[in-house]
Amino acid sequence: MAQTSQGGQPGGQGTQQLSDRDILQLCLNECKHKASSLNIYIQEATSEQLRRDYMTVLGDVYSQEQQLFELMQQKGYYNVKNANPQDISQAKNKFSGQQSQSGMQSQSGMQ
């Protein structure tokens, strides 16, 4: 468990304690932020080598995210409800409909 004072120094009066759950949540949030930033860097990279390097780092960040997520689930900090088959079917239909509509729009724009 980590301790920091309000002034940022360990120990002392006015200390706040972060729980293991808080620390893991902060780490997971940081991984999500890194992944989001890396996606932008990949899209905007002008060098193919740089793009590949960013993609390698992004893969590492995804692995870290997965490990944190699994650890949080094991400790009971991150509970995910399984979707029922009807919800899955509805989501699939929704996104396949959007995909076919966007395909038609791009084709009509090309004519």
Image (cartoon, rainbow, N blue to C red):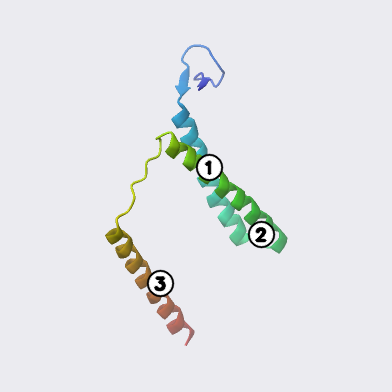
- Give left or right: position of 27 versus 75: right
Q: Residues within 10 Å of mark 3 (few under 14, many from 20)?
A: few
Whichever of labels 1 and 2 marks the residue nearer the N terminus, that label is: 2
Judge the density around disc 2: few (<14), some (14-19), many (≥20) Cα neighbours within 10 Å.
some
Disc 1: CA contacts within 10 A as few (<14), some (14-19) or many (>=20): few
Q: Residue at x 41, y 80 (%)?
A: 104
List x then y, in percent, for residue 58: 60, 52
Is 32 displayed left or right of 46 in the figure? left
Secondary structure under tag 3 reads helix
Q: Residue at x 57, y 18 (%)?
A: 9
Determine the CA span between mark 2 and mark 3.
27 Å
Looking at the rendered structure, the kind of residue marked 3 is Gln
Which residue was labeled with disc 3? 99
Location of residue 87 (image quadrant): bottom left
Residue under label 1: 67
Q: Amino acid at mark 2?
A: Arg
